[in-house]
Image (cartoon, rainbow, N blue to C red):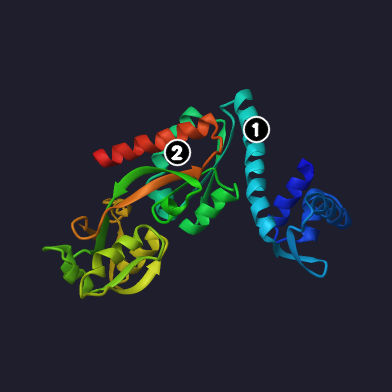
Amino acid sequence: MNLSQIELLRILQENDFSLSKAAEKMHIVQSAVSRQLQLFEEELGSPIYERQGKRLIGLTSLGQRIMEEVATINMAKNNIQTIAADYIDSNQGVLHIATTHTQAKYFLPKPILRFREKYPGVRIYMIEASPEQLINKLHTRKADIAICTEKIGEDAGLVVKPCYEWHHAAVVPQNHPLSEGDISLKRLASYPVLTYSFGFTGRSNIETAFKNTDMELDIILAAADTDVIKTYVRLGMGIGIIAGMAYDPIMDQDLAARDLSHLIPSSKTKIAYLKNNYLPLYTQHFIDELLIAAKELNIH
């Protein structure tokens, strides 16, 4: 058993058990891949792959257990490389941030700007996706940290830090009936609603608010992007329920915003990264910048 064989197992799993793709990734011929797998399984005394002819179609129960250890070994290897790079120069590197559109546009600009002033040698790559996809980016090491509200606290393989709490707001055109007077769930439910897609930006809390009532929201449009929601509110399609921080008093002067903190439970944005994953000093400092920005948000 050697590290090349361990690496082969990881590459096969990441490429749907394709022998040809694994051979291409490892820059060897496919027959060499097959031979290494044969030697590995002979050493173990049991197959780790289910086969259909010569094609690998999945893992045996033993293979599934072994892949857990392969993931640990791969993390250790990556940690060693990161520790060495950090030791040589902790001011250089690449930071991959996985987040949603709302966080990227309305929360992250200030902490990123501050971070860049301190670490101009660190390049930043931002990946926008759904919360489920963000978690997958962490596990496949395509992201170093993830920042979002939904789903992220449900994964036992992650370290999760609370960042900040926020509330929803209703946005309507100026002079709309909801632009003044008391706001209630009943009044909200009397209009068509435009809000976030399932799994995005506190949508679950919007559902929770109406769960124990006899009223149902008539959600006629759902989107992941707040700006899309505001665009269709401007067209008169209905009222928007968005993250309160996504309302800009200057850019959105044509819209009125109504606070819904007394009607919809608060949401909490979180920061997450893989357990046992070594974070370079610049990544640790970026997390500190996020928490400072979060504290300022809560103060204001």
Q: Is residue 228 visible from the viewing direction of this image?
A: yes
- Residue 59 place in picture, x, y as percent: 69, 61
Q: Residue furthest front?
A: 45
Q: Is residue 246 left or right of residue 63?
A: left
At horizontal 62% and vertical 41% (from top left) the residue drawn is 75
In the picture, which quadrant includes the C terminus? top left
Would you identify the image quadrant in which residue 110 lies?
top left
Residue at 73 percent of width and 56 percent of height: 12
* Pointers 1 and 2 in contact (C-beta within 8 Å): no
Mark number displayed over residue 260: none
Q: Position of residue 270 (x, y in %)?
A: 39, 46
Q: Which residue is mark 2?
A: 112
Vertical order, 38 against 173 (above or below): above
Side of 56 where 211 appears, left or right: left
Given the current orientation, which residue lies at the most extreme left position? 181
Name the secondary structure under disc 2. Answer: helix
Residue found 47% across the figure and 30% down from its top? 117
Q: Amino acid at mark 1?
A: Ile
Residue placed under numbered mark 1 in the picture: 80
Image x and y of residue 138, in percent: 54, 48
Give the tally of numbered discs: 2
> Would residue 39 appear left or right of 162 to someone viewing this image?
right
Q: Which secondary structure lies at badge 1?
A: helix
